[in-house]
Amino acid sequence: MNKLTGFIFGGAALATIALVSAPMATAQDGASPGGRPSAHRGQMGGGFRGGAPLINIALQHKSELNLATDQIATLEKIKSHYQSQVTPLRQQIQTIEQEIASLSQQSPANLIQIKSKLQEAEKYRSELRYLQLEAMDNGRSVLTAQQRDQLKTLVSSRHENFRKTQKQPS
């Protein structure tokens, strides 16, 4: 009887974790549970809303960074390539998360199927993360050492400004 009770409570705990982590897991790839980009990832190489953040920042500050025309074109190409690769992956993750939510609602939940879906989603998240790092590395390789240093300074100041605005009372 103790084994059965342990199994039931363990299964309930796993189902609860699946329900709680499903929205958070979706948000890890830079999208909120509703599929919209999240506001802030808190790390430079993290969520790539519409493209690599370093590439976006570099393109937004192309004059301050003194980017040449060919550098701008290359960064735009990297950004576009990244977006075309991650869109289907994000859609797959969203579909899997919906399936997990549906499976979790069943009573009793099919934990083997849920575990399989979780593992499937993690493969896609891993691929997303790799693509993020690849885009970031490709973007950095386009910039000179001086431009990379300037970009680091811009990113630092953006982070500081973000932190200051978060600490201000509403």
Image (cartoon, grey):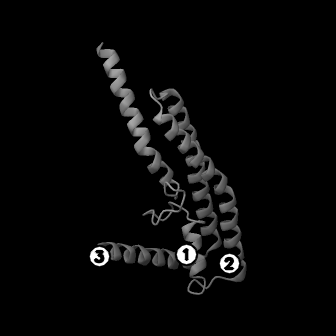
Residue 114 appears left or right of 10: right
User: Marks 2 and 3: CB-CB under 8 Å?
Assistant: no
SS for dot 3: loop
The answer to which quarter of the image holds residue 122 is top right
Q: Where the C terminus falls, by quadrant?
A: bottom left
Residue 35 picture location, percent across and down? 54, 57
Q: Amino acid at mark 1?
A: Ile
Mark 1 Cα shell of 10 Å, populated few (<14), some (14-19), many (≥20): some
The answer to which quarter of the image holds residue 2 is top left
Q: Amino acid at mark 3?
A: Ser
Which of 139 and 108 lies nearest the eye of the viewer?
A: 108
Of label 3 and label 1, which has the lower sequence position? 1
Mark 2 Cα shell of 10 Å, populated few (<14), some (14-19), many (≥20): some
Find disc 1 in the rendering and name its residue: 57
Q: Residue furthest top?
A: 1
Q: Residue at x 35, y 76 (%)?
A: 165
Q: Residue at x 58, y 76 (%)?
A: 58
Find disc 2 in the rendering and name its residue: 72
Of label 2 and label 3, which has the lower sequence position? 2
Residue 76 picture location, percent across and down? 68, 72
Find disc 3 in the rendering and name its residue: 170
The answer to which quarter of the image holds residue 108 is top left
Q: Amino acid at mark 2?
A: Ile
User: Marks 3 and 1: CB-CB under 8 Å?
Assistant: no
Q: Residue at x 47, y 35 (%)?
A: 104
The numbered disc on residue 23 is: none
Residue 64 picture location, percent across and down? 56, 86
Q: Residue at x 55, y 32 (%)?
A: 116
Question: Viewer-nearest of labels 2 and 3?
Answer: 3
SS for dot 1: helix
C-alpha gap between disc 2 and disc 1: 12 Å
